[in-house]
Amino acid sequence: MNLQGCGTALVTPFRADGSIDERALYDLARWQVESGIDWLVACGTTAETPTLDEAEWLEVIRIVADAAGGRVPVWAGCSHNATKLAVARARTAAQVPGVTAILTANPWYNKPTQEGQFQHFRAVADGVKLPVVLYNIPGRSAANLEPATVLRLIEAAPNIEAVKESSGNLVQITELITQVPKGFQVYSGDDGMTLGVLGVGGAGLVSVVSNIIPAEMAEMVKAALGNEWTTARRINRRYFRLMQGIFKETSPGPVKAILAMMGKLEEQYRLPMVPVSAGTRAFLERMAGELGLLVHGPRPDGDLHMY
């Protein structure tokens, strides 16, 4: 895959009636590409994917791929805690034009052992020909994918080409980076840990905050990968409080709140996600205002194809 840089784990905009706001999603994805983001992730954690039914899940992937228009890679989130359904999702997403890789997370709630995770991820990889990106997010799944298991998976399934590491454990991530074969990509899954992960050899970032500041995060990652650390640290210093602030409550609540303030979408969620508290909203609005994020123009013009 050999993909370096910054990708955005997109939110899913909804209308007041709970339906997907196709126009807002298309515009958001296109704005990301035009802002210099290196790839897009549809139906990751940030997309409230567990609340989407199968038809909606596929619709989101198709809209994002259409908006990307082949200008950047698109990863399709194909996670499930039932291996059979994760494999089925991966096979379906792989048929969508413009999808270039499958992103698949630890099975949640089941709390599988390392052997269980090995067999789960191998089944997903064996089910498709596209590159597969493992997604280790123990804070959501209650299961940590250990470096030794990742190494087994690399050996067992050649199309497993990368991992998004969201363990928050820099020692574990460093251990992994120092042991994986050349060409295997390890991405930071936490905005606030990006420079640390890149500093020990990471390939890039799958970002949440880039929903809000795509150009800035793309520039920061590019600078760090190019050993321009003064620039990277300057950008990190300016936006680090925002990187932390968007997790003041469960993501993507704060991200959607700021995007709504920017006029990018309606602030709508699906239960069990709810709007952020009044105190958090005031904090986010003040911070976004101080960073100059609330000055915005109209949505981009352009055709939405069938949307």
Image (spheres, rainbow, N blue to C red):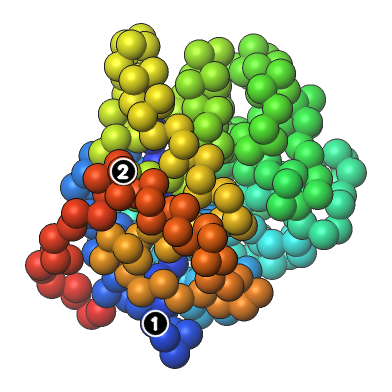
Q: Which kind of residue does numbered mark 2 sit on?
A: Glu
Left or right of residue 296, residue 131 in this image: right
Q: Is residue 236 above or below residue 279?
A: above
Q: Residues within 10 Å of mark 2 (few under 14, many from 20)?
A: few
Going by the image, does 242 lie left or right of 124?
left
Numbered disc 1: secondary structure:
loop
Q: What residue appears at the point 55 percent right and 22 percent down from the top-left corner?
A: 197
Q: Is residue 286 left or right of residue 250?
A: left
Give the image location of residue 229, x and y in percent: 36, 11
Snapshot quadrant of residue 52: bottom right
Q: Label 1 is placed on what type of residue?
A: Arg
Q: Quadrant of the N terminus?
A: top left
Q: Position of residue 208 (x, y in %)?
A: 46, 47
- Where residue 123 appears, as percent x and y from the top left, is 72, 51
Q: Is residue 31 left or right of residue 122?
A: left
- Which residue is most to the left? 301
Distance Cα–Cα, label 1 vs label 2? 28 Å
**In the figure, residue 271 lies in which quadrant?**
bottom right
Residue corresponding to mark 1: 15
Between disc 1 and disc 2, the foreground one is 2
Q: Secondary structure at mark 2?
A: helix
Q: Which residue sits furthest bottom?
A: 17
Q: Which residue is mark 2?
A: 290
Using the image, determine if residue 108 lies above or below residue 158.
below
